[in-house]
Amino acid sequence: MVENNKKLKAEIDRLKKELKKKKKYGLVWEDKPEDVVEMCKEKLPVLKEVKGKEIITDKNKPVNLLIEGDNYHALSVLNYTHRGKIDLIYIDPPYNTGAKDWLYNNSFVDNEDPFRHSKWLSFMHSRLKLAKNLLSQNGILAVAIDHYELLSLGMMTDEIFGEDNRLAIVTVVHKAEGRQFVKGFNPTCEFMLFYAKDKTKCTVNMVPLDSGVQASFDLEDENGKYRLENNIRLGGGSVSLRVNNPTSWYPIYISKDCKIISLEKRSGLIPVYPITKKGEERTWNTSKETFQTNLENGQFVVKNEGGCYAIYRKYREKQSIKTHWIKPQYNATRYGTQLLNGILGSNTFNFPKSLFAIIDVLKIATSPKSTVLDFFAGSGTTGHAVFEMNKEDGGQRQFILCTNNENKICEKVTYPRIEKIIKGYKNTKKENINGLGGNLKYFKTDFVDYKESTDRNKIKLTKEAVEMLCVKEGTFESVLDNEDFKIFKNHDHYAGIIFDQLAIDDFKKAIKDIKGKISVYIFSLGDDSFEDEFEDIKQKVKLSPIPEAILKVYRRIYK
């Protein structure tokens, strides 16, 4: 009897645990295994450079990356090389319209597929989970989407990133005239979902997106740009009238030379009330308490306008970002398709995004040294936008673009576009367009068979991971290359890879004249970083065992 009670209690405890695992609220779908995900159980992705497509115009500038291959595999590699290093992820994924616009397990998904939504959700979920790991603590995700999957995507991103980290759902009017031949409700807009890795740590740049508005901030002080606006509340309906809002009717005392502003009545100061030139008794824009705070921060200016004194407040450039974006430059036909055709020729890619829409995302979510990732890179608009932003503000942003090569898009569209933007080109009007300069490395995803964790497989993975390590360290220039070890550098950093621990002494001799810290990767069948062998130069080196560090990442994401 006692034994039966124990078994019953154990079964009740098991059932309780199972019930806790059940989702009580959220998005549920039929999970559909994906071939590119399943293959990673036996083959591990690595990167291989396409040597003939390197573009270097300035070794002192960051190197941008173009990765050709399935983005699930590219994201897997980046989970090792760039975990926590990406400041902005912008993506424009397939919209799942049912018009055979994307492949799942080598088959186009159309309206007739009963699992169309489940396949799309499985596809997006696996990639967004990997992408989240890449964001820095102040990183931001921006996802473009239209009405077909907006609601599903919103619930999924709420689940992965947390509802509290949702920054905004923005409406982007990209085709104000609507679509031809559409009856009933005619879509004129798409949407953009913004999420933070951690809302308490991220910074959103509150800058005007409209160039006309931006130009209106024509004054500047130590706190930044501003424009002057009358402190009298002129709008706001009845609340702007004294009779309806008496607490915001009060005198502000100023000196005749306009240098003194005070709420205190003092000898020699003139009282000014919120009365318009037409004699209307209105109110000030703020309460007395708020006015005093802003006054102490130097936010008011007095002007003598023909014998009448007017009080102006400094309206700062940094205000708020509206969630309805509409301006001519968002037109995807003119500033997406036609722009791309002007660079590469006609009919090169369907539905590229407006260059200026992505530039505005960069204005909001990046700083001059940010790293930007787009793993649905398509025609390469994000890379183009990064170059344009760097030109505008002198920044050193760098990008990572990932795209498959379906219909040779990476070879025939993405790469040629970035190449022309860097080097310059002649458009379809035979006009010479100057290049913006910059650097690019072109990689393809490759695979290492790894069904078992054998010594042989570990050696094989280490040999094939050299370019992954160069990507991780940003060191692409070869300094020394032999069978036992390799050394690479960039303009301010070195990295070494040692394949045979017996070559450690020779490696130390090779780096003795190198100044600064060196990242050193040492082959180990276990997790030994050989710290004792580097004790005499421990301040100079940062040691990591390989391939164990890579395998740890892959075990975590493929579990």
Image (spheres, grey):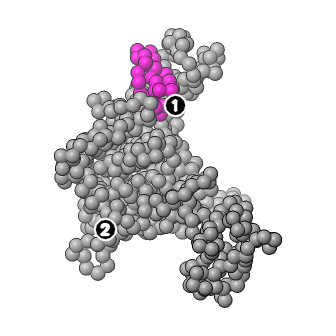
Residue at x-position 55% and y-position 13%: 512
Residue at x-position 62% and y-position 17%: 537
Q: Quadrant of residue 97?
A: bottom left
Residue 364 visible: yes
Q: Where are the magenta residues, as a range?
A: 469-497
Magenta stretch encompasses residue 477:
yes
Residue at x-position 65% and y-position 67%: 302
From the viewer's perspective, is 125 left or right of 200?
left
**Looking at the picture, how far across and down is residue 72, in whole percent?**
39, 46
Residue placed under numbered mark 1 in the picture: 548
Q: Quadrant of residue 40?
A: top left
Residue in front for this viewpoint, 172 or 434:
434
**Looking at the picture, how far across and down is residue 345, in whole percent?**
19, 49
Q: Which mark is residue 175?
A: 2
Q: Are marks 1 and 2 in contact (CB under 8 Å)?
A: no
Where is 318 relative to 486, above or below?
below
Closer mark to the observer between disc 1 and disc 2: 2
Residue at x-position 68% and y-position 60%: 298
